[in-house]
């Protein structure tokens, strides 16, 4: 693995710029803050940039920066206490020793899926000269885009090529968020790899980086092309429909119910909507368990309203990005209600992957320049809420409410929708305003496609959200149903070595296996799983 190697530098935190100051002013501002001349600063590198919007009348940007200084100036700066700045020396990080494969197996590794976990596992294996075979049930990005746009335009669903299935996984149609709280040196490597394949350089330092679905698609294609140049092989429209297992060890797989391929190593990144794959694993005896999940609605506001709420008198300033929000509430009965996957300047999208099931999600382009802001508002769901027991209980819970939403929307993949005030007051839906959702919306009472506890919890939480963000529950706010795919409904059990609990050679990875919750965490999980495979071969 190649971590980013930093030179001997000084790290300075808590440097601020007002909205009217430019980043070109940083050199002079730093020099004044630490008491040196600007000419003595040999180099500046932005490590972190965030927006502090806690005081609406004093919005400002906060920076952490690495400085290259002459040795004598380093000593002065480090020895000078500061009440506002944090100053410390940054030591170079040693690069880890390269992996060596002593006992390279006869068969190449196989990876199922092409989402972040699968692609970063493939990169890790390819780096050491052991390029894998990647199997993707869906289509390549260009063809997948055509199928999704046809669905949004006409309501004709392609069950193997949609928002959930195809090259890049579900993240290919998302906001492309890269924010994570994980503290692992590989995270910097992951962001660096995204930048290397075409993501904007700002993802390396923004506090909440994102790529946007438009740029993420190009990054995914570039990663595929690179992997193929290095010997990896991709097969699309190749669904794994069976496993060959003997005495608890993986022997091979079946593709599209026809072709058998021998392999002792399979990294499985199925995606959180691969319900038929979950069933296949269950029939093969792979250990799994159901897990908690969330259910709720999408809320859509005019972006200008969210900007006004979050930025106050600074709204409209050209340096301000489209405003975001994050809301949480603990209900009187103990359930958590929270915003999820907030997409500023984005769109609510139809994300179904099964016939007669309605699913919503959110998506933004890199510039986030749509007039709409949207977010999921979801309610915590536990095992006690499932009608049945067993590993598929959560999956069937999701499906049941998706089918109700499909029926409520008119059985044509139109989303059932209701003005937020009407939902809050339990009124019949009034006329609906324009929305970003395609192929369309149908006025409906959204409580009919939600469990009773979810509707009650949301009605309890919304007044609190409105107090936190005055205007949140305005007449322009609209709710659309239904949001169910916030995470995998089950977990494919694995040990500390990342192998299945009861099938050796099977490595469940990523969000679809129940071990991640976003692009970066999935990529990290895939890298770590690949390293576990390599460790066994040292």
Image (cartoon, grey):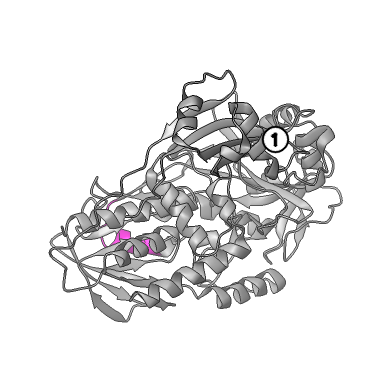
Instruction: Please say whether residue 437 is one of the residues in the magenta stretch.
Output: no
| Quarter-of-image position of residue 315 | top right
Q: Residue at x 53, y 71 (%)?
A: 159
Q: Position of residue 113 (x, y in %)?
A: 41, 66
Does the stretch in magenta take in 285?
yes
Secondary structure under badge 1? strand
* Segment tinted magenta in the rendering: 277-287
Of residues 458 and 390, which is closer to you in this image?
458
Q: Confirm whether residue 472 shows in the render.
A: no
Q: Residue 313 occupies which quadrant of the picture?
A: top right
* Residue 329 falls in image quadrant: top right
Which is more toward the observer, 357 or 46?
A: 46
Q: Residue at x 45, y 75 (%)?
A: 225
- According to the image, label 1 marks what residue? 17
Task: Decide if residue 40 is on the left or right side of residue 298.
Answer: left
Determine whether, in the image, residue 429 is placed left or right of residue 368.
right
Viewer-side residue, 20 vs 506: 20
Q: Given the current orientation, which residue lies at the most extreme bottom position?
A: 258
Residue 78: x %, y % from top left? 47, 25
């Amino acid at each position: 693995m190649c971590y980013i190697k930093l030179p001997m530098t000084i790290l300075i935190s808590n440097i601020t710029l007002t909205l009217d100051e430019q980043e070109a002013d940083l050199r002079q501002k730093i020099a004044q803050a630490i008491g040196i001349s600007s000419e003595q600063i040999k180099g500046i590198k932005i490590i972190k940039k965030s927006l502090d919007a806690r005081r609406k009348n004093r919005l400002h940007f906060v920076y952490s920066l690495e400085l290259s200084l002459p040795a004598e100036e380093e000593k002065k700066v480090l020895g000078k206490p500061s009440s506002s700045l944090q100053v410390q020396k940054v030591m170079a990080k040693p690069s880890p020793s390269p992996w060596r494969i002593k006992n390279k197996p006869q068969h190449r590794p196989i990876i199922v899926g092409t989402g972040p976990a699968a692609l970063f596992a493939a990169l890790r294996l390819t780096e050491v000269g052991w390029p894998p075979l990647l199997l993707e049930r869906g289509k390549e990005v260009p063809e997948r885009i055509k199928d999704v746009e046809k669905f949004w335009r006409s309501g004709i669903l392609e069950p193997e090529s949609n928002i959930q299935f195809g090259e890049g996984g579900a993240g290919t149609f998302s906001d492309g968020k890269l924010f994570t709280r994980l503290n692992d040196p590989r995270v910097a490597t992951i962001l660096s790899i995204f930048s290397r394949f075409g993501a904007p350089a700002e993802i390396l330092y923004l506090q909440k980086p994102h790529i946007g679905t438009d740029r993420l698609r190009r990054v995914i294609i570039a990663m595929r092309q690179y992997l193929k140049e290095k010997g990896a092989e991709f097969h699309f429209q190749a669904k794994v429909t069976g496993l060959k297992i003997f005495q608890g060890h993986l022997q091979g797989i079946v593709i599209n119910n026809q072709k058998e391929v021998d392999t002792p190593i399979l990294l499985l990144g199925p995606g959180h909507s691969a319900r038929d794959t979950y069933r296949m694993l269950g029939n093969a005896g792979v250990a799994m368990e159901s897990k908690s999940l969330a259910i709720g609605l999408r809320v859509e506001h005019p972006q200008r309203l969210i900007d006004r709420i979050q930025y106050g008198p600074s709204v409209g300033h050209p340096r301000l990005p489209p405003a975001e929000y994050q809301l949480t509430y603990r209900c009187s009965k103990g359930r958590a209600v929270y915003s999820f996957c907030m997409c500023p300047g984005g769109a609510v999208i139809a994300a179904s992957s099964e016939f007669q099931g309605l699913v919503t999600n959110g998506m933004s382009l890199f510039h986030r320049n749509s007039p709409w802001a949207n977010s999921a508002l979801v309610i915590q769901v536990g095992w006690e809420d499932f009608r049945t027991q067993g590993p598929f209980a959560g999956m069937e819970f999701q499906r049941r409410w998706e089918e109700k939403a499909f029926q409520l929307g008119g059985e044509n993949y139109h989303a059932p929708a209701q003005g937020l005030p009407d939902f809050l007051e339990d009124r019949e839906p009034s006329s609906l305003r324009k929305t970003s959702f395609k192929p369309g919306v149908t006025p409906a009472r959204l409580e009919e496609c939600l469990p009773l506890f979810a509707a009650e919890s949301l009605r309890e939480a919304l007044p609190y959200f409105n107090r936190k963000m005055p205007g949140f529950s305005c007449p322009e706010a609209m709710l659309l149903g239904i949001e169910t795919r916030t995470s995998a409904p089950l977990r494919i059990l694995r040990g500390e070595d990342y192998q299945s609990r009861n099938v050796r050679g099977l490595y469940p990875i990523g969000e679809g296996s129940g071990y991640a919750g976003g692009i970066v965490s999935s990529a990290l999980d895939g890298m770590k799983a690949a390293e576990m495979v390599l460790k066994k071969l040292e």
